[in-house]
Image: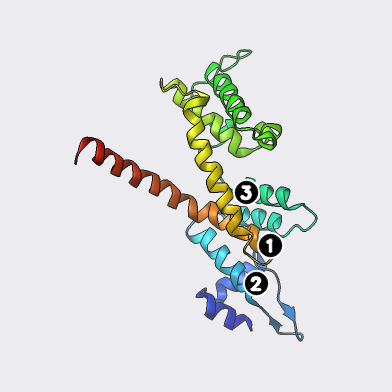
């Protein structure tokens, strides 16, 4: 399809499509002559993803560019490529550099964070998630989890590995389902694009399903 057709089918204004091309968010088309290029369904899929990340996910262009660079990096193995793309996305609880709890005195450890870090380590060991244990604090998700648990600890809400285990098992089942769905797609790039879309757009679905389920269970236990 021509560039104008790409914009029409995607619903994205032509000027915006050209901007995404200039910014490297959309791969160039197949050149047919000095002034024209052709685009295919992969460009349409990528364009829709970029639009969703920027408009719905509210991600800055620089972040989108970084994520997509990992999506397209064929020098990486599938797991590393997927992990790199997801690591480049914002994490809601932030890493340790974003933590807003009281700082430890110079030369002293933060006891809440130390306790949370140990708790996460114990949980991962109980789950048998060896890859996650090996990566540890290099993972933004790991750091965000420690930060959230440390903050809960400071507020007086104590958790044990046994408390967290049912949640983790549920997430393990969700992750298996995610990968089952990904593997129905035709190639690695499409699968990783799906994972990125899920992280940006589907995690709110999971969050709100949990909140609706909590309201339903509350109604059943305590009445309306």
The answer to whether residue 5 shows anywhere in this view is yes
Indicate the secondary structure of the residue bearing disc 2: helix
Asked if the residue at tag 2 contacts the one at tag 1, i.e. Cβ–Cβ closer than 8 Å, the answer is yes
Local crowd size for mark 3, using a 10 Å CA cut-off: few (<14), some (14–19), many (≥20): many
* Furthest-bottom residue in this view: 33
Q: Residue 173, image x and y in percent?
A: 54, 45
| Coloring basis for residues | rainbow
Q: Position of residue 89 (x, y in %)?
A: 59, 48
Image quarter in which the C terminus is found? top left
Q: Looking at the image, which residue is at 25% across and 40% down?
A: 220
Which residue sits at x=64%, y=84%? 2
The local secondary structure at tag 1 comes to: helix
- Residue occupied by mark 2: 42
Q: Is residue 124 above or below residue 69?
A: above
Q: Residue at x 70, y 61 (%)?
A: 188
Q: Secondary structure at mark 3?
A: helix
- Disc 1: which residue: 189
Does residue 205 appear to the left or right of 71 in the view shown? left
Q: Quadrant of the N terminus?
A: bottom right
Mark 1 or mark 2, earlier in chain: 2
Relative image position of residue 157 (x, y in whole percent): 41, 23
Q: Which residue lies most toward the right here?
A: 75
x, y percent for residue 70: 70, 54
Residues at marks 1 and 3, CA–CA distance in whole angstroms: 13 Å
Q: In this rendering, is residue 22 above or below 191?
A: below
The circle on residue 91 is none
Ranked by sequence position, the earlier of labels 3 and 2 is 2
Residue labelled with disc 3: 86
47 left or right of 133?
Answer: left
Residue nearer the viewer, 68 or 121? 121
Residue 106, quarter of the rendered image: top right
In the image, 9 versus 214, the foreground residue is: 214
């Amino acid at each position: 399809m021509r560039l104008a057709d790409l914009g029409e089918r995607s619903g994205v204004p032509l000027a915006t499509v050209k901007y995404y091309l200039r910014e490297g968010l959309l791969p160039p088309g197949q050149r047919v002559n000095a002034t024209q290029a052709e685009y295919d369904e992969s460009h349409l899929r990528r364009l829709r993803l970029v639009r969703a990340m920027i408009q719905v996910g509210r991600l800055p262009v620089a972040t989108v560019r970084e994520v997509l660079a990992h999506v397209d990096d064929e020098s990486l193995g599938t797991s590393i490529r997927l992990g790199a793309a997801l690591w480049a996305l914002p994490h809601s609880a932030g890493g340790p550099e974003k933590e807003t709890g009281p700082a430890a005195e110079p030369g002293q450890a933060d006891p809440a964070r130390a306790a949370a870090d140990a708790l996460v380590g114990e949980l991962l060991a109980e789950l048998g998630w060896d890859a996650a244990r090996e990566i540890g604090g290099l993972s933004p998700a790991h750091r965000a989890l420690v930060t959230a648990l440390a903050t809960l600890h400071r507020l007086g809400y104590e958790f044990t590995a046994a408390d967290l285990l049912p949640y983790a098992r549920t997430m393990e089942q969700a992750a298996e389902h995610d990968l089952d769905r990904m593997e129905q797609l035709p190639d690695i790039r499409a699968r990783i694009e799906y994972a990125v879309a899920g992280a940006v757009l589907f995690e709110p679905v999971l969050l709100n399903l949990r909140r609706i389920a909590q309201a339903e269970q509350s109604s059943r236990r305590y009445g309306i």
